[in-house]
Amino acid sequence: MDQDPFFRTLRAGGHRLTQARMAVIAALRKASAPLSAAEILASCLAAGARIDRATAYRELEFLASSGIALPVRLEGRSLRYEISDRGHHHHAVCLKCENIQEVKADAALEAAETRVAKRVGFTVLRHAFELFGLCKKCR
Amino acid sequence: MDQDPFFRTLRAGGHRLTQARMAVIAALRKASAPLSAAEILASCLAAGARIDRATAYRELEFLASSGIALPVRLEGRSLRYEISDRGHHHHAVCLKCENIQEVKADAALEAAETRVAKRVGFTVLRHAFELFGLCKKCR
DNA sequence: TTGACAGTGCGACTAAGTCGCATTAATCTT
DNA sequence: AAGATTAATGCGACTTAGTCGCACTGTCAA
């Protein structure tokens, strides 16, 4: 536990390793796609942790501010979170099976973005790029 | 009124030109940035149309399904709509002044998207590309 | 082992959106 | 111009996602 980089970060920041916190981190780690607060709560409860809805929301917000969880807002869906140690990527959402697939970032795409931003005089702090359609299996 | 392309489309589809419908279309036309249902409702009421909240929501959904309104889902904000006759574009959201700016689509960007999608075997039906940061005035 | 206080549970609240159903009004027909 | 037809509306109750204040509790450093 003490060799876990996230746990070390938290302790270094003076934060406690509570049951709720560890349960939420575990739920995020276990997930293969971004999860909503409700799903994370369910996952924690299923794993035996007795945590409250409000705590789940607060914990996710806290983990996001600590850089451990990454908020993922995909259009039409409620806010989701994923664990932050998977590198920069985008998401492809299948409109049929509802699955969310990770898509590795593409250098040309990022370059195009930078150029577009410069053209309109906009300082980009963050961007969203998402695909909606049919995954390999569903098309 | 009868020469308005949207009105012609609606009539051709057997739909009625009701007060609410025309008020919502007028509100969308008047807007310079995507509006939320609440803002559209307010705009209609301010213009003297007495329409209900539920009607505003239903009308926007209907106009979207008719291709007259375009749903715009920007992360962290509620669903917005814009009029559909302005050509394909993306949005840049200023995190300081909250303004939403239109950004013309970029060919290189779209090309990169196509390539990325092909790589992961995904059939893209729709995509979202948004910038978040500081606009010219705010940076 | 205990004191301090970060974090929690509870419950009440808000915002955004949905839905069923009786009624109204836009359009068609004559 | 007066009905008849039925799309669209208003009302109100409901749902879902998320927030907040406050008293309590569990974590951890001393």
Image (cartoon, coloured by chain):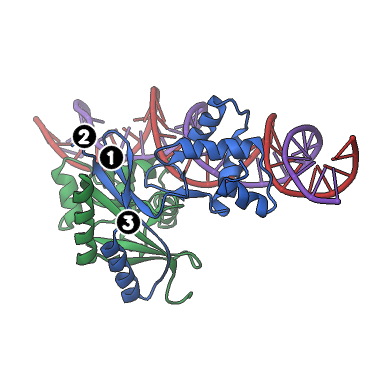
Chain colours: A blue, B green, C red, D purple
- The amino acid type of the residue labelled 2 equals Cys
Say which label, 1 or 3, has the lower sequence index. 1
Question: Which chain letter matches label 1?
Answer: A
State how far apart marks 1 and 3 are (Cα). Answer: 18 Å
- In the displayed structure, does residue D20 sit left or right of residue A82? right
Do the residues bearing badges 3 and 2 touch, measured as CB atoms within 8 Å?
A: no
- Residue B78 seen in this snapshot: yes
Residue at x 23%, y 47% (from the top left corner): B120
Pointer 2 residue:
A138
Residue at x 45%, y 77% (from the top left corner): B137
Nearest to the eye among marks 1 and 3: give it: 3
Mark 2 residue element: loop
For residue A50, above or below residue B125: above
For residue B60, above or below residue A117: above
Say which label, 3 or 2, has the lower sequence index. 3
Question: Which chain letter matches label 2?
Answer: A
Mark 3 residue element: loop
State how far apart marks 1 and 2 are (Cα). Answer: 8 Å
Between C21 and C12, the one nearer to me in the picture: C12
